[in-house]
Image: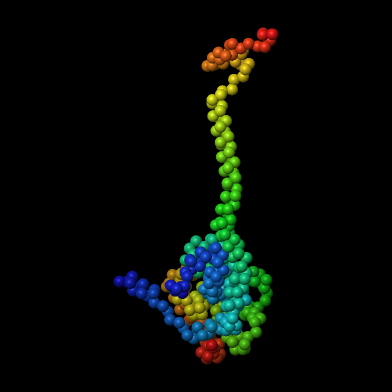
């Protein structure tokens, strides 16, 4: 992820601690997608994932002085994202106790371009909701965000072998779930 | 050898699953809004602006303002302390040269370790002359 031409996480954290807006913006740019993916894996909803990911960056900035290993900012941030997302889900579940059944909790106010895309998203959400949380995180970070399993291991604080194992089982379950949906295999191939 | 094989196995990257990646791409907010991540970042940075400004103020205080404010308080205090110290030093020196002895003490009783000055013995009062 970090190349030699780009400032390291620790350098950006050091500058952000002094209020450098550009450095903080670079940290946000670097981690916004994985933060969203982790939040989505916990909340299962776009709006909640967005809220949790955005709030997590603000919490991280407030507590930046508590980040003892700035070179491991990514892992530290992901912990905040997971905790914020879990808190958000807990609050939501207290509010919506007798609404939709699990797996059909989606609320998508954003207009979709096509009904098929919305349907695919819904199918994916259902399939992902059947996976354990850690498997959702691993498969989203790997297959959606393009992280290497070593990066995932480092940032989720898991052994490399465990990440690979989670990825294997998550894919298997995801594929099986999607195969059950009529017409889904073909749609997966033509999906953008 | 076994350890080596294990390490290689750990390092081996599982390749991307193109079909799953394509399917999961539907969950990427960009699939609905091409400027999504730009807006996301803008929102975060806007919301973070007060905290970033506070941190900048904190940094400038430690460098300039704090030193200046220290100097502002420190210089007059140091000058006052120096003046007081000088005054005390002068007073203690003068006290050592001229120990305070009252006239009554000189006239009526012996001061321990001091002889009555010869000039005092030959003092005559105005009442005796007239």
Give the answer, above or below, for where A32 lies relative to B69.
Answer: below
Judging from the image, the colouring scheme is rainbow
Q: Is residue B23 visible?
A: yes
Residue drawn at point x = 49 percent, y = 80 percent: A143
Seen from the viewer's position, the closer of residues A151 and A91 is A151
Seen from the viewer's position, the closer of residues B107 and A134 is B107
Of the 4 image quadrants, the one containing the N terminus of chain B is: bottom left
Of the 4 image quadrants, the one containing the C terminus of chain B is: top right
Seen from the viewer's position, the closer of residues A77 and A161 is A77
Give the total number of marks visible in the rendering: 0
Q: Residue furthest front?
A: B130
Seen from the viewer's position, the closer of residues B122 and B77 is B122
Where does residue B14 sit, x and y in percent of width and height?
Answer: 42, 79
Q: Residue furthest left?
A: B1
Give the answer, above or below, for where A128 lies relative to B98.
Answer: below
Where does residue A151 sit, x and y in percent of width and height?
Answer: 45, 73
Where does residue B113 sit, x and y in percent of width and height?
Answer: 52, 16
Residue drawn at point x = 56 percent, y = 40 percent: B82
Where does residue A21 sit, x and y in percent of width and height?
Answer: 56, 68
Residue drawn at point x = 65 percent, y = 71 percent: A92
Give the answer, above or below, for where A159 lies relative to A177.
Answer: above
Q: Is residue A123 visible?
A: no
Residue drawn at point x = 56 percent, y = 27 percent: B95
């Amino acid at each position: 992820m970090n190349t030699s031409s780009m400032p390291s996480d620790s350098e950006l954290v050091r500058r952000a601690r002094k209020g450098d807006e550009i450095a903080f913006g670079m940290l946000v740019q670097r981690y916004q997608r994985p933060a969203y993916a982790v939040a989505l894996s916990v909340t299962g909803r776009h709006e909640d994932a967005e809220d949790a990911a955005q709030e997590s960056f603000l919490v991280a900035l407030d507590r930046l002085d508590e980040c003892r290993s700035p070179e491991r900012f990514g892992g530290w941030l992901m912990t905040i994202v997971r905790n914020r997302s879990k808190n958000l889900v807990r609050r939501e579940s207290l509010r919506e106790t007798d609404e939709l059944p699990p797996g059909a909790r989606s609320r998508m106010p954003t207009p979709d371009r096509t009904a098929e895309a919305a349907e695919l998203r819904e199918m994916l959400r259902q399939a992902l909701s059947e996976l354990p949380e850690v498997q959702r995180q691993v498969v989203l970070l790997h297959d959606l965000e393009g992280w290497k399993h070593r990066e995932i291991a480092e940032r989720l604080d898991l052994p490399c072998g465990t990440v690979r194992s989670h990825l294997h089982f998550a894919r298997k379950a995801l594929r099986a779930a999607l195969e059950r949906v009529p017409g889904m295999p073909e749609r997966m191939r033509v999906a953008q | 050898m076994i350890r080596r094989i294990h390490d290689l196995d750990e390092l081996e990257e599982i390749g991307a699953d193109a079909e799953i990646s394509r399917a999961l791409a539907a969950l990427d907010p960009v699939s609905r809004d091409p400027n999504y991540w730009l807006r996301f970042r803008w929102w975060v940075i806007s919301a973070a602006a007060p905290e970033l400004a506070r941190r900048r103020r904190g940094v400038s205080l430690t460098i300039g303002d704090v030193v200046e404010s220290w100097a502002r308080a420190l210089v007059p205090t140091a000058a006052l302390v120096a003046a007081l110290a000088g005054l005390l030093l002068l007073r203690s020196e003068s006290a050592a040269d001229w120990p305070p002895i009252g006239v009554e003490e000189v006239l009526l009783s012996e001061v321990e370790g001091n002889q009555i000055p010869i000039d005092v013995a030959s003092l005559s009062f105005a009442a005796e002359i007239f």
